[in-house]
Image (cartoon, rainbow, N blue to C red):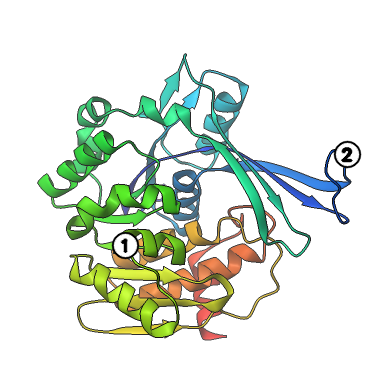
């Protein structure tokens, strides 16, 4: 039996993703031809699957409804080897869902989400499962958690001295992480999320670089501001810089940021240099956008290192 070297706890959202891509120019108040794909998503769930594919032992705390989607999702996670024993099954709320409409060039047009079930992950629930935090080598989380749940979770990671990797999720949710920046090992906002975290517009390369350094000044060990096809900026106490996006034919951009966060977290566990961990994350993002699924099903650590040296 293989015993993974790293134990990871992932906490946050999981649900059903629906992606709609028009086949032609759309008309309002009409039925329009489109490609409609669905699959499992949620920032935390995506991170958990990526980490499992990279070889970590993954425990997931999320909430699903007591419905067919929740049952199918938990079954899918179990088949991936992800431990879901601490997941909440709600009798009151439906399993989370996310629906996105894209332009024909795969740029996001508009999206809708229902994450009401995430309220079931309470501060008390996390406290009762504190052993999962104590036993983890790193905790990866998203900002879909309530303020009370985040306060408890960060209190537990501080109490047990556990590394934290955080994905701000959306600009509207990013502010929930502001009180805990000094307790976060690595954070991976996109540009809009970074602006929400630092409370300022970041226009131009110098401003983005300054924004990343501000997050480090607030206590983050590794701040990464992602720019999609524009690559990313990163900063630590010792260095900062820009890394261009890897050349890749984009099939679907959904999930790229989650893959980056997961690979960076894995790099931290492997104790590679912070810059190399960032590059590992970039490789994971590139591999993901080349796949139609939110998580590339054949992602491996070996494949990422092949991208790094190619």
Question: Residue at image x 37%, y 73%?
Answer: 277
Q: Give the x, y percent position of residue 197.
A: 32, 60
Q: Mark 2 points at which residue?
A: 31
Residue 271 versus residue 37: which sits nearer the camera?
Answer: 37
- In the shown orientation, is residue 142 left or right of residue 292? left
Question: Residue at image x 24%, y 62%?
Answer: 185
Residue 113 versus residue 95: which sits nearer the camera?
Answer: 113
Residue 104, picture quadrant: bottom right
Can residue 188 be seen here? The reply is no
Q: How crowded is mark 2: few (under 14 residues within 10 Å), some or many (20 or more)?
A: few
The vertical placement of 60 against 207, above or below, is above
Q: Give the x, y percent position of residue 84.
A: 42, 33
For the C terminus, give its image quadrant. bottom right
Residue 108 versus residue 248: which sits nearer the camera?
Answer: 108
Q: Give the x, y percent position of residue 299.
A: 56, 61
**Which SS class for mark 1?**
loop
Outermost residue toward the left in this view: 159
Residue 276, picture quadrant: bottom left
The vertical placement of 53 against 215, above or below, is above
Q: Residue 297 carries which label?
A: none
Q: Give the x, y percent position of residue 235.
A: 30, 77
Q: Mark 1 points at which residue?
A: 199
Can residue 136 be seen here? The reply is yes
**Which SS class for mark 2?**
loop
């Amino acid at each position: 039996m293989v015993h993974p070297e790293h134990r990871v706890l992932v906490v946050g959202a999981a649900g059903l993703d629906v992606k709609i891509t028009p086949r032609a120019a759309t008309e309002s108040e009409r039925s329009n031809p489109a490609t409609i794909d669905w699959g499992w998503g949620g920032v935390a769930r995506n991170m958990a699957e990526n980490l499992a594919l990279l070889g970590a032992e993954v425990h997931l705390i999320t909430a699903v409804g007591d419905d067919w989607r929740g049952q199918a999702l938990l079954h899918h996670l179990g088949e991936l080897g992800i431990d879901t024993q601490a997941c909440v099954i709600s009798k009151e709320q439906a399993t989370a869902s996310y629906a996105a409409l894209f332009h024909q060039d795969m740029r996001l047009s508009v999206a809708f989400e229902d994450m009401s079930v995430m309220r079931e992950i309470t501060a008390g629930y996390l406290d009762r499962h504190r052993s999962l935090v104590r036993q983890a080598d790193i905790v990866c989380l998203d900002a879909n958690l309530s303020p009370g749940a985040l306060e408890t979770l960060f209190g537990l990671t501080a109490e047990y001295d556990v590394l934290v990797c955080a994905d701000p999720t959306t600009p509207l949710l990013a502010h929930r992480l502001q009180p805990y920046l000094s307790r976060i090992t690595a954070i991976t906002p996109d540009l809009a999320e970074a602006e929400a975290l630092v409370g300022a517009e970041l226009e131009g390369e110098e401003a983005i670089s300054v924004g990343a350094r501000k997050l480090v000044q607030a206590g983050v060990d590794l701040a990464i501001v992602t720019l999609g096809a524009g690559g990313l900026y990163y900063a630590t106490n010792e260095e900062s810089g820009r890394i261009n996006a890897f050349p890749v034919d984009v099939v679907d951009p959904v999930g790229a940021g989650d893959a980056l966060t997961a690979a960076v977290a894995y790099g931290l566990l492997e104790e590679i240099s912070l810059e190399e961990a960032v590059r590992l994350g970039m490789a994971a993002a590139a591999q993901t956008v080349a796949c139609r699924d939110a998580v590339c099903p054949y992602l491996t650590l070996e494949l990422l290192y092949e991208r790094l040296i190619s």
